[in-house]
């Protein structure tokens, strides 16, 4: 067989495989029955309640549940019990928290008490540090390095922003005497801290976001604020989150990208937008009702490019949750887990009513009245 004939045969085989793959993907996207069969039997995306690892939930009315990294934690009567992704208990920690606030990033979970100044940092199943600060913790956040920031009230100032190093040492404080803060976030590298700055003294609310250089805050605090982002009066800030060294900002009229002192609107919240979420790495999302097709659409916006993805949902949506790279879409009778490429990762069908859905980086806690089912994502 000549080299020319071999080349033709190889090209023909590759062409057939490519065409077959295109047809298979098209059929997968377009045929609901075929897609369901592939998802369940080949890709193992279709999961049903009572088939997952679980944890019995005792004193359900007095318990708070958290998901982070590969762990589930249950707080009850000042004891935090930590489980792995198989539902096995790995440790118990004493924490004086009655009204918990929490944030997670990777294997870190930070807990604070909304009634006092108690703050606890957990890494995996180990307590890293705890602090009792002056005032009441209103908001808490953490980055992937374990740096913690808190918005504190109940002092002589309207709000105090406090930053803690991964070892628990206080890095600096920023005092707000005439305005107050509703949210705070730390960049992944720990070089920047941003907080909302709200002025309600006039006839209309004035909302701003201020960015602090952590290095300058330690050495020359009077020069620490390096960017101030202002918005139209009357507009209300919801929350902010770092994506690299850029900020995703959610307001009552839309989502914005804040970078190097410049503000760019990502999408507008219209009457057809039922949910909006920015708690992702490098993405923001919203749910829009597609009246033309009679469906709901998950719109996925990439903050680093102009790319936009979509995922269509046939049923009415109760709630969405975001964490890092996954959006959990709660339909009541099902939960669909979609990645930031617009592809279904898992579809879960519960056997009873879901009370809450909690996302860690690699785990999801499906919380019911009497138990927690653990889904790996």
Image (cartoon, grey):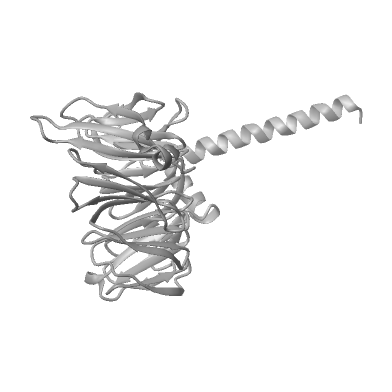
Percent across and percent down for residue 31 are: 45, 40
Percent across and percent down for residue 308 are: 42, 29
Q: Is residue 24 left or right of residue 282?
A: right
- How many labels were placed on the picture? 0
In the figure, residue 370 lies in which quadrant? bottom left
Q: Against 41, is 92 above or below?
A: below
Q: Is residue 196 visible from the viewing direction of this image?
A: yes
Q: Against 130, is 287 above or below?
A: above
Could you tell me which residue is drawn at 40 percent across and 59 percent down?
109
Kindly give the residue lying farthest to the right in the view shown.
Answer: 1
Front-most of residues 102 and 270:
102
Considering the image in quadrants, where does the N terminus appear? top right
Q: Is residue 8 left or right of residue 168?
A: right
Percent across and percent down for residue 275 are: 27, 40
Front-most of residues 258 and 339:
258
Could you tell me which residue is drawn at 23 percent across and 59 percent down?
114
Q: Is residue 193 left or right of residue 15?
A: left
Q: Is residue 246 left or right of residue 316?
A: right
In the figure, residue 4 lies in which quadrant? top right
Q: Is residue 351 visible from the viewing direction of this image?
A: no
Percent across and percent down for residue 307 are: 46, 28
């Amino acid at each position: 067989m000549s080299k020319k004939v071999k080349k033709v045969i190889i090209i023909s085989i590759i062409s057939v495989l490519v065409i077959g793959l295109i047809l298979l993907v098209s059929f997968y996207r377009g045929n609901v029955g075929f897609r369901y069969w592939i998802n369940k039997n080949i890709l193992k995306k279709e999961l049903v309640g009572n088939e997952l690892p679980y944890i019995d939930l005792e004193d359900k009315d007095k318990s708070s549940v958290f998901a982070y990294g590969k762990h589930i934690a249950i707080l009850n009567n000042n004891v935090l019990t930590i489980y792995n992704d198989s539902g096995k208990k790995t440790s118990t920690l004493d924490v004086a928290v009655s009204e918990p606030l929490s944030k997670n990033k990777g294997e870190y979970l930070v807990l604070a008490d909304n009634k006092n100044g108690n703050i606890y940092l957990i890494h995996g199943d180990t307590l890293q540090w705890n602090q009792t600060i002056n005032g009441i913790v209103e908001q808490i956040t953490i980055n992937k390095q374990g740096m913690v920031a808190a918005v504190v009230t109940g002092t002589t100032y309207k709000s105090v922003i406090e930053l803690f190093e991964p070892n628990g040492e206080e890095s600096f404080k920023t005092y707000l005497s005439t305005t107050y803060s509703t949210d705070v976030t730390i960049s992944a590298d720990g070089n920047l801290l941003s907080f909302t700055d709200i002025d309600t003294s006039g006839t209309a609310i004035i909302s701003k976001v201020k960015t602090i250089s952590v290095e300058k805050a330690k050495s020359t605090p009077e020069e620490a604020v390096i960017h101030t982002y202002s918005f139209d009066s009357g507009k209300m800030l919801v929350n902010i989150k770092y994506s690299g060294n850029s900020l995703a900002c959610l307001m009552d009229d839309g989502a914005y990208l804040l970078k190097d002192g410049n503000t760019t609107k990502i999408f507008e919240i219209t009457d057809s937008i039922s949910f909006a979420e920015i708690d992702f790495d490098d993405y923001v999302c919203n749910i829009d009702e597609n009246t033309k097709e009679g469906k709901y659409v998950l719109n996925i916006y990439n903050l680093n490019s102009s790319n936009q993805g979509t995922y269509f949902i046939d049923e009415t949506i109760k709630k969405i949750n975001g964490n890092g790279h996954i959006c959990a879409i709660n339909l009541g009778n099902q939960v669909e887990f979609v990645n930031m490429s617009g592809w279904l990762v898992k579809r879960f069908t519960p056997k009873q009513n879901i009370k809450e859905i909690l996302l860690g980086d690699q785990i999801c806690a499906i919380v019911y009245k009497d138990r927690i089912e653990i889904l790996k994502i």
